[in-house]
Image (spheres, rainbow, N blue to C red):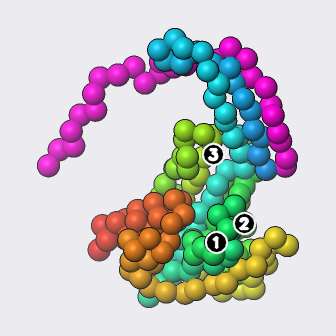
Amino acid sequence: MPLPSAPAVDETHNPWQTLSTEVKYHNPWISVREDQVLNPRGGRGIYGVVSMKNKALGIIPIDAEGNTWLVGQYRYALNEYCWEIPMGGGPVELDILESAQRELKEETGLTAARWTRVARIHTSNSVTDEEGFVFLAEDLTAGDVEPEETEDLRLWKLPLAEAVRLCMEDRITDGISVAGLLKVEKLLAARK
C-alpha cells in the first residue's frame, strides 16, 4: 500500500522573526537563550531555547542470540530511576560514530565490529535544538566497563523483545530509547 502524500507546504519558509537574542545561562553542556520574536501571526513574544553542546547518542547492542543491554541509573532531572539503552553525548565537532563507540565501551564494556545508524531524532523540538542519533551495534566483544565519575550504572542483559515490551508498558520512557528499540525491532524483523 503506498504511503499518503504530505500536504504541499514550503518547508524552507520560517514564519518566525527573531528580533533579538540574549544568552541567559550556559555551562559546558547547555546554553539557554531568550529570543524576542514576532510569532507566525505577527504578535510579539519571547521564545526560550535550550541549545545543546553535544549530540545525543544511543546505542542498541544486539548479540547473536538476540539479546540487548539496558543501562539503569538515577536521573537527576527526573528524580527517578530509569532503564534506557546505552547512551551519552558526543561533542558536536566529533564524528558521531566514534562518540557512539566510546559510549558503548564506557557504559557496557562492549565493542562492536558492525555499526548501523538507525535513527536521527529531535528530542523535544519545541524547546531544544538537541539532535540525537541511534546506532545498532552487532558482532559484539565483551570487555571492561569504564563509567564516568557522574555515572552509577547497572547493566541488564535481556532479549530485545523484552526491552520492547518494557517500552510498551512505559517502564522505559526515555524518548531515544523507545524510538531506537522500536526501530531496531522492525529493522531486524525485516532482515528475516
The image's mark for residue 160 is: none
Can residue 29 be seen in the rendering of this structure? Answer: yes
What is the crowding at mark 1: few (fewer than 14 residues within 10 Å), some, or many (at least 20)?
A: few
Residue at image mark 1: 80
> In the rendering, at what x and y percent does residue 155 appear?
63, 84
| Relative height, residue 185 to residue 54 (above, below) | below
Instruction: Name which residue type carries label 3.
Output: Glu
Q: Answer whether residue 27 is magenta in the image.
A: yes
What's the magenta region? Answer: 1-28
Gap in Å between the C-alphas at discs 1 and 3? 22 Å
Tag 1–tag 3 contact (CB < 8 Å): no
**Residue visible at 60% across and 15% down in the picture:** 44
| Position above or below: 174 against 42 | below
Asked whether the viewer can see residue 114, the reply is: no
Quadrant of the drawing holding the C terminus: bottom left
Q: Position of residue 83 (x, y in %)?
A: 57, 75
Q: Main secondary structure of the magenta part?
A: loop
Give the mark nearest the N terminus, 1 or 3. Answer: 1
Q: Which residue is mark 3?
A: 130
